[in-house]
Amino acid sequence: MAETKAGPTVSDLFRRAQAIRQENPQTSYRDIAKQIAREFSGGPFPPTYNLTIPEQDARAPEEDWSAGLPLVLRGIQQQDWNDIAQGIILSLEQTENYERERGGEGTRDAWHDRSAGIEGATDKGVSKWMPEELVKLAEKNAPH
């Protein structure tokens, strides 16, 4: 049985697009898409079983960061890196636009607070199942 090399995940591609953007914030979305397609072209395609960018949920609502996923899926199905890159860029652009319009995490109004209503239950669940020393370690290492 031949072993197949795993391709980058959709999250990997999104993180790469973010890195390019951070390295040079003036780079256009179009140029980032071209660079993504160029860098990954010829390699294995992302798997479709985890077509998501979960770490973006803290930055913007799902409807924003997932905007480009249908294009990514089409690109994977048709084995077209240009479509995949366009989908990644659409999600990046929507996420950045949301942050620009609404502000970064922690600066939004109470209506956009994703911890509202679940914070108490989360604390109760963590305290019940997580040893105290791990809670202290996590709190110590958490960004403030």
Image (tube, helix red, strand yellow):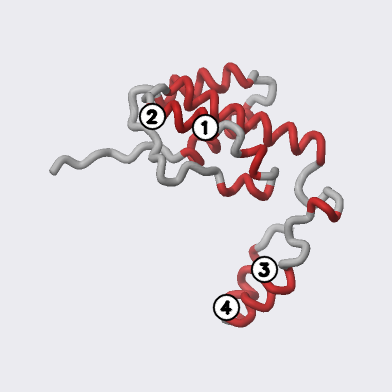
The percent coordinates of residue 26 (x first, y second) are: 69, 20
Q: Which tag, 3 or 1, sits closer to the chain's start? A: 1
Q: Is residue 64 above or below residue 33?
A: below
What is the three-letter code of the residue carrying label 2? Gln
The residue that disc 4 covers is 130
The percent coordinates of residue 123 (x first, y second) are: 69, 74
Q: Is residue 118 above or below residue 65?
A: below
Q: Is residue 25 above or below residue 58?
A: above
Q: Which tag, 4 or 2, sits closer to the chain's start? A: 2
Q: Which tag, 3 or 4, sits closer to the chain's start? A: 4
| Mark 3: few/some/many CA within 10 Å (<14, 14-19, 20+) | few
The percent coordinates of residue 18 (x first, y second) are: 60, 34
Q: Which tag, 2 or 3, sits closer to the chain's start? A: 2
Q: Secondary structure at mark 3?
A: helix
The residue that disc 2 covers is 77
Q: CA distance from mark 4 to mark 2?
A: 42 Å
Q: CA distance from mark 3 to mark 1?
A: 39 Å
Q: Quadrant of the C terminus?
A: bottom right
Q: CA distance from mark 4 to mark 1?
A: 38 Å
Q: Secondary structure at mark 2?
A: helix
Q: Nearer the viewer, mark 2 or mark 3?
A: 2
Residue 87 vs residue 34, the one in the foreground: 87
Q: Are marks 4 and 2 in contact (CB under 8 Å)?
A: no
Residue 43 vs residue 26, the one in the foreground: 43
What is the three-letter code of the residue carrying label 3? Lys
Q: Nearer the viewer, mark 3 or mark 1?
A: 1
Q: Are marks 4 and 1 in contact (CB under 8 Å)?
A: no
The residue that disc 1 covers is 70
The residue that disc 3 covers is 140
Q: Are marks 2 and 3 in contact (CB under 8 Å)?
A: no
What is the three-letter code of the residue carrying label 4? Met
